[in-house]
Amino acid sequence: MPLFRSWLFVPGNQPRMLAKAPSLGADVLLFDLEDSVPLAEKPRARELVAEAIAGLVGQARPPAYVRVNALQTGLCSEDIAAIARPGLAGVMLPKVDTAERVAEAEALLEQAEASGLAAGRLTLVPIVETALGLVWAFEIASASPRIVAVAFGAEDFALDMGLIRTREASELALARQTVAIAARAAGVGALDMVYPWVDDDPGLVASAEVGRRMGYRSKQVVHPRQVPVVNRLLGYSPDEVAWAERVVAAYAAAEAEGRGAVSLDGNMVDRPVVERARRILETGGASGES
Protein backbone atom coordinates (compact mmCIF):
# COMPACT_ATOMS: atom_id res chain seq x y z
CA MET A 1 0.00 0.00 0.00
CA PRO A 2 1.30 3.50 -0.77
CA LEU A 3 2.04 5.82 2.12
CA PHE A 4 -1.41 7.12 3.06
CA ARG A 5 -0.74 9.39 6.02
CA SER A 6 -4.10 10.96 6.88
CA TRP A 7 -7.46 9.16 6.76
CA LEU A 8 -10.18 11.78 7.24
CA PHE A 9 -13.57 10.80 8.64
CA VAL A 10 -16.46 12.55 6.87
CA PRO A 11 -20.00 12.18 8.34
CA GLY A 12 -22.20 10.48 5.78
CA ASN A 13 -25.27 12.53 6.61
CA GLN A 14 -23.67 15.95 5.95
CA PRO A 15 -23.95 16.88 2.23
CA ARG A 16 -21.78 19.99 2.49
CA MET A 17 -18.96 18.12 4.22
CA LEU A 18 -19.16 15.29 1.70
CA ALA A 19 -18.86 17.77 -1.16
CA LYS A 20 -15.94 19.63 0.40
CA ALA A 21 -13.97 16.59 1.57
CA PRO A 22 -11.91 15.93 -1.60
CA SER A 23 -10.38 19.42 -1.37
CA LEU A 24 -9.18 19.12 2.23
CA GLY A 25 -5.78 17.52 1.57
CA ALA A 26 -6.34 14.15 3.22
CA ASP A 27 -4.61 11.16 1.66
CA VAL A 28 -7.75 9.03 2.11
CA LEU A 29 -11.41 9.96 2.61
CA LEU A 30 -13.36 7.90 5.15
CA PHE A 31 -17.05 8.46 4.51
CA ASP A 32 -18.78 7.41 7.72
CA LEU A 33 -22.02 5.50 8.09
CA GLU A 34 -21.35 4.39 11.66
CA ASP A 35 -20.85 6.47 14.79
CA SER A 36 -21.33 9.95 13.31
CA VAL A 37 -24.73 9.08 11.81
CA PRO A 38 -27.86 8.67 14.00
CA LEU A 39 -29.85 5.49 13.38
CA ALA A 40 -32.81 7.32 11.82
CA GLU A 41 -30.52 9.03 9.30
CA LYS A 42 -28.59 5.99 8.14
CA PRO A 43 -30.76 5.23 5.05
CA ARG A 44 -30.37 8.79 3.77
CA ALA A 45 -26.66 8.75 4.63
CA ARG A 46 -26.19 5.68 2.41
CA GLU A 47 -27.71 7.59 -0.49
CA LEU A 48 -25.55 10.66 0.13
CA VAL A 49 -22.36 8.65 0.43
CA ALA A 50 -23.16 6.71 -2.74
CA GLU A 51 -23.64 10.03 -4.57
CA ALA A 52 -20.36 11.36 -3.18
CA ILE A 53 -18.49 8.26 -4.36
CA ALA A 54 -20.03 8.51 -7.81
CA GLY A 55 -18.90 12.13 -7.98
CA LEU A 56 -15.27 11.11 -7.53
CA VAL A 57 -15.12 8.90 -10.62
CA GLY A 58 -12.85 10.30 -13.29
CA GLN A 59 -11.34 12.97 -11.03
CA ALA A 60 -7.90 13.33 -9.54
CA ARG A 61 -8.99 12.33 -6.08
CA PRO A 62 -7.92 10.71 -2.84
CA PRO A 63 -9.10 7.10 -2.46
CA ALA A 64 -12.56 6.80 -0.90
CA TYR A 65 -13.35 4.29 1.83
CA VAL A 66 -16.59 3.92 3.77
CA ARG A 67 -16.80 2.99 7.43
CA VAL A 68 -19.88 0.80 7.44
CA ASN A 69 -21.80 -0.33 10.48
CA ALA A 70 -20.55 -3.41 12.30
CA LEU A 71 -21.77 -6.81 11.21
CA GLN A 72 -23.23 -7.28 14.67
CA THR A 73 -25.75 -4.44 14.06
CA GLY A 74 -27.50 -6.09 11.13
CA LEU A 75 -26.94 -2.93 9.06
CA CYS A 76 -23.70 -3.85 7.35
CA SER A 77 -25.13 -5.74 4.38
CA GLU A 78 -27.41 -2.82 3.46
CA ASP A 79 -24.48 -0.41 3.78
CA ILE A 80 -22.25 -2.40 1.46
CA ALA A 81 -24.98 -2.97 -1.10
CA ALA A 82 -25.70 0.76 -1.23
CA ILE A 83 -22.15 2.07 -1.57
CA ALA A 84 -20.41 -0.60 -3.68
CA ARG A 85 -19.88 1.21 -6.97
CA PRO A 86 -17.10 2.61 -9.16
CA GLY A 87 -15.07 5.14 -7.20
CA LEU A 88 -15.07 3.13 -3.96
CA ALA A 89 -11.67 1.81 -2.92
CA GLY A 90 -12.89 -0.28 -0.01
CA VAL A 91 -14.67 -0.66 3.29
CA MET A 92 -13.61 -0.01 6.86
CA LEU A 93 -15.24 -2.59 9.12
CA PRO A 94 -15.78 -1.82 12.83
CA LYS A 95 -15.81 -4.18 15.81
CA VAL A 96 -13.86 -6.98 14.14
CA ASP A 97 -13.19 -9.41 16.96
CA THR A 98 -12.39 -12.64 15.06
CA ALA A 99 -11.21 -13.74 11.63
CA GLU A 100 -14.70 -15.09 11.00
CA ARG A 101 -16.00 -11.50 10.92
CA VAL A 102 -13.60 -10.81 8.07
CA ALA A 103 -14.94 -13.82 6.17
CA GLU A 104 -18.51 -12.55 6.63
CA ALA A 105 -17.55 -9.15 5.27
CA GLU A 106 -15.66 -10.71 2.38
CA ALA A 107 -18.79 -12.62 1.35
CA LEU A 108 -20.79 -9.37 1.35
CA LEU A 109 -18.15 -7.66 -0.79
CA GLU A 110 -18.21 -10.56 -3.26
CA GLN A 111 -21.99 -10.24 -3.56
CA ALA A 112 -21.72 -6.50 -4.12
CA GLU A 113 -19.04 -6.89 -6.79
CA ALA A 114 -21.23 -9.36 -8.68
CA SER A 115 -23.57 -6.48 -9.53
CA GLY A 116 -21.03 -4.85 -11.84
CA LEU A 117 -17.62 -4.41 -10.20
CA ALA A 118 -14.49 -6.39 -10.96
CA ALA A 119 -14.05 -9.37 -8.65
CA GLY A 120 -11.66 -8.59 -5.80
CA ARG A 121 -11.72 -4.86 -6.49
CA LEU A 122 -12.93 -3.74 -3.06
CA THR A 123 -10.38 -3.79 -0.26
CA LEU A 124 -10.94 -4.05 3.46
CA VAL A 125 -9.70 -2.28 6.60
CA PRO A 126 -10.82 -4.06 9.79
CA ILE A 127 -10.84 -2.09 13.03
CA VAL A 128 -9.52 -3.79 16.14
CA GLU A 129 -11.32 -2.09 19.01
CA THR A 130 -12.23 -4.74 21.59
CA ALA A 131 -10.29 -6.94 23.98
CA LEU A 132 -11.25 -10.02 21.97
CA GLY A 133 -10.19 -8.35 18.73
CA LEU A 134 -6.81 -7.52 20.23
CA VAL A 135 -6.26 -11.15 21.25
CA TRP A 136 -6.91 -12.21 17.65
CA ALA A 137 -5.24 -9.21 15.99
CA PHE A 138 -2.81 -11.16 13.79
CA GLU A 139 -5.45 -13.66 12.71
CA ILE A 140 -7.70 -10.75 11.75
CA ALA A 141 -4.93 -8.90 9.91
CA SER A 142 -4.05 -11.98 7.86
CA ALA A 143 -7.58 -13.28 7.29
CA SER A 144 -8.07 -12.07 3.70
CA PRO A 145 -6.06 -10.87 0.71
CA ARG A 146 -8.49 -7.94 0.54
CA ILE A 147 -7.04 -6.47 3.73
CA VAL A 148 -4.73 -3.53 3.03
CA ALA A 149 -4.50 -2.17 6.58
CA VAL A 150 -5.71 -2.74 10.12
CA ALA A 151 -6.93 0.17 12.23
CA PHE A 152 -6.78 0.57 16.00
CA GLY A 153 -10.01 1.94 17.46
CA ALA A 154 -8.98 3.53 20.74
CA GLU A 155 -12.28 4.97 21.93
CA ASP A 156 -14.25 1.74 21.69
CA PHE A 157 -11.33 -0.26 23.04
CA ALA A 158 -11.22 2.00 26.11
CA LEU A 159 -14.97 1.55 26.50
CA ASP A 160 -14.74 -2.22 26.22
CA MET A 161 -11.92 -2.38 28.76
CA GLY A 162 -13.38 0.19 31.14
CA LEU A 163 -10.23 2.32 30.84
CA ILE A 164 -9.93 5.94 31.90
CA ARG A 165 -9.11 7.61 28.57
CA THR A 166 -6.34 10.21 28.81
CA ARG A 167 -4.80 12.53 26.24
CA GLU A 168 -1.35 11.03 26.57
CA ALA A 169 -2.92 7.54 26.08
CA SER A 170 -0.45 5.61 28.22
CA GLU A 171 -3.30 3.25 29.14
CA LEU A 172 -3.57 2.30 25.44
CA ALA A 173 0.12 1.81 24.69
CA LEU A 174 0.17 -1.98 24.82
CA ALA A 175 -2.93 -2.40 22.66
CA ARG A 176 -1.82 0.26 20.21
CA GLN A 177 1.59 -1.33 19.75
CA THR A 178 0.07 -4.81 19.46
CA VAL A 179 -2.10 -3.76 16.51
CA ALA A 180 0.91 -2.23 14.74
CA ILE A 181 2.93 -5.42 15.31
CA ALA A 182 0.09 -7.65 14.09
CA ALA A 183 -0.31 -5.56 10.95
CA ARG A 184 3.40 -5.70 10.21
CA ALA A 185 3.51 -9.45 10.80
CA ALA A 186 0.63 -9.88 8.35
CA GLY A 187 2.27 -7.63 5.77
CA VAL A 188 -0.45 -4.95 5.76
CA GLY A 189 -0.60 -1.30 6.79
CA ALA A 190 -1.24 -0.09 10.34
CA LEU A 191 -3.71 2.76 10.87
CA ASP A 192 -3.26 4.67 14.13
CA MET A 193 -6.06 5.81 16.44
CA VAL A 194 -7.83 9.15 16.26
CA TYR A 195 -6.92 12.04 18.52
CA PRO A 196 -10.41 13.32 19.39
CA TRP A 197 -9.44 16.67 20.97
CA VAL A 198 -9.61 18.71 17.78
CA ASP A 199 -8.51 22.03 19.34
CA ASP A 200 -5.37 20.58 20.93
CA ASP A 201 -2.65 20.82 18.29
CA PRO A 202 0.24 20.04 20.68
CA GLY A 203 -1.61 16.92 21.82
CA LEU A 204 -2.15 15.86 18.22
CA VAL A 205 1.53 16.34 17.47
CA ALA A 206 2.48 14.22 20.48
CA SER A 207 -0.02 11.51 19.50
CA ALA A 208 1.25 11.33 15.92
CA GLU A 209 4.88 11.26 17.03
CA VAL A 210 4.28 8.46 19.53
CA GLY A 211 2.37 6.51 16.90
CA ARG A 212 5.19 6.91 14.41
CA ARG A 213 7.69 5.61 16.96
CA MET A 214 5.42 2.57 17.39
CA GLY A 215 5.50 1.86 13.66
CA TYR A 216 2.43 3.71 12.42
CA ARG A 217 2.74 5.78 9.25
CA SER A 218 -1.02 6.39 8.86
CA LYS A 219 -3.49 8.01 11.23
CA GLN A 220 -7.25 8.44 11.44
CA VAL A 221 -8.30 12.09 11.77
CA VAL A 222 -11.67 13.52 12.75
CA HIS A 223 -11.32 17.16 11.68
CA PRO A 224 -9.85 18.87 8.61
CA ARG A 225 -7.53 21.00 10.74
CA GLN A 226 -5.75 17.82 11.81
CA VAL A 227 -4.89 16.81 8.23
CA PRO A 228 -1.85 19.05 7.57
CA VAL A 229 -0.35 18.25 10.98
CA VAL A 230 -0.61 14.52 10.42
CA ASN A 231 0.65 14.76 6.83
CA ARG A 232 3.70 16.69 7.98
CA LEU A 233 4.55 14.37 10.85
CA LEU A 234 3.88 11.02 9.21
CA GLY A 235 5.22 11.82 5.77
CA TYR A 236 8.85 11.53 4.76
CA SER A 237 10.68 14.85 4.73
CA PRO A 238 12.86 15.84 1.76
CA ASP A 239 15.90 15.19 3.96
CA GLU A 240 14.73 11.64 4.71
CA VAL A 241 14.13 10.94 1.02
CA ALA A 242 17.55 12.33 0.11
CA TRP A 243 19.14 10.19 2.84
CA ALA A 244 17.38 7.09 1.50
CA GLU A 245 18.60 7.77 -2.02
CA ARG A 246 22.18 8.17 -0.82
CA VAL A 247 22.03 4.99 1.27
CA VAL A 248 20.69 2.88 -1.60
CA ALA A 249 23.27 4.27 -4.01
CA ALA A 250 26.17 3.75 -1.59
CA TYR A 251 25.13 0.19 -0.82
CA ALA A 252 24.74 -0.67 -4.50
CA ALA A 253 28.27 0.58 -5.11
CA ALA A 254 29.56 -1.51 -2.19
CA GLU A 255 27.81 -4.63 -3.47
CA ALA A 256 29.34 -4.12 -6.90
CA GLU A 257 32.73 -4.23 -5.16
CA GLY A 258 31.84 -7.39 -3.25
CA ARG A 259 31.29 -5.69 0.11
CA GLY A 260 28.22 -6.29 2.31
CA ALA A 261 28.43 -3.07 4.28
CA VAL A 262 29.59 0.49 3.75
CA SER A 263 30.22 3.55 5.89
CA LEU A 264 28.18 6.67 5.09
CA ASP A 265 28.56 9.91 7.05
CA GLY A 266 30.43 7.99 9.74
CA ASN A 267 27.65 5.41 10.21
CA MET A 268 27.73 1.76 9.22
CA VAL A 269 25.17 0.96 6.51
CA ASP A 270 24.27 -2.72 6.39
CA ARG A 271 21.25 -4.57 5.00
CA PRO A 272 18.62 -3.55 7.63
CA VAL A 273 19.50 0.12 7.11
CA VAL A 274 19.28 -0.31 3.34
CA GLU A 275 15.91 -2.03 3.58
CA ARG A 276 14.57 0.89 5.63
CA ALA A 277 15.84 3.28 2.96
CA ARG A 278 14.25 1.21 0.22
CA ARG A 279 10.90 1.24 2.00
CA ILE A 280 10.98 5.02 2.06
CA LEU A 281 11.54 5.12 -1.69
CA GLU A 282 9.14 2.29 -2.51
CA THR A 283 6.22 3.96 -0.70
CA GLY A 284 6.66 7.01 -2.86
CA GLY A 285 8.73 9.07 -0.46
CA ALA A 286 5.70 11.24 0.33
CA SER A 287 6.97 14.55 1.56
CA GLY A 288 6.22 15.78 5.03
CA GLU A 289 5.92 19.30 3.61
CA SER A 290 2.40 18.90 2.20
Image (tube, rainbow, N blue to C red):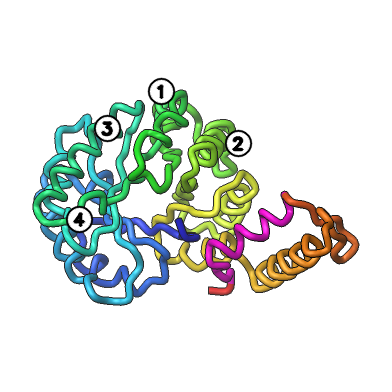
- Relative depth, front residue between 46 and 159: 46
Q: Which residue is under mark 1?
A: 132
Q: Which residue is under mark 2?
A: 170
Residue type at mark 3: give it: Ala
Nearer-N-terminus badge (2/3): 3
Taking the spot 31% from the left edge, 68% from the top edge, the residue there is 21
Taking the spot 18% from the left edge, 46% from the top edge, the residue there is 38
Q: Secondary structure at mark 3?
A: helix
Nearer-N-terminus badge (1/4): 4
Q: Which residue is under mark 3?
A: 103
Q: Are marks 2 and 3 in contact (CB under 8 Å)?
A: no
In reply to whether residue 275 is colored magenta, the answer given is yes
Q: Secondary structure at mark 4?
A: loop
Q: Real-space Cα distance between discs 1 and 4?
A: 33 Å
Q: Tell me: residue 151, above or below residue 254.
A: above
Q: Which residue is under mark 4?
A: 118
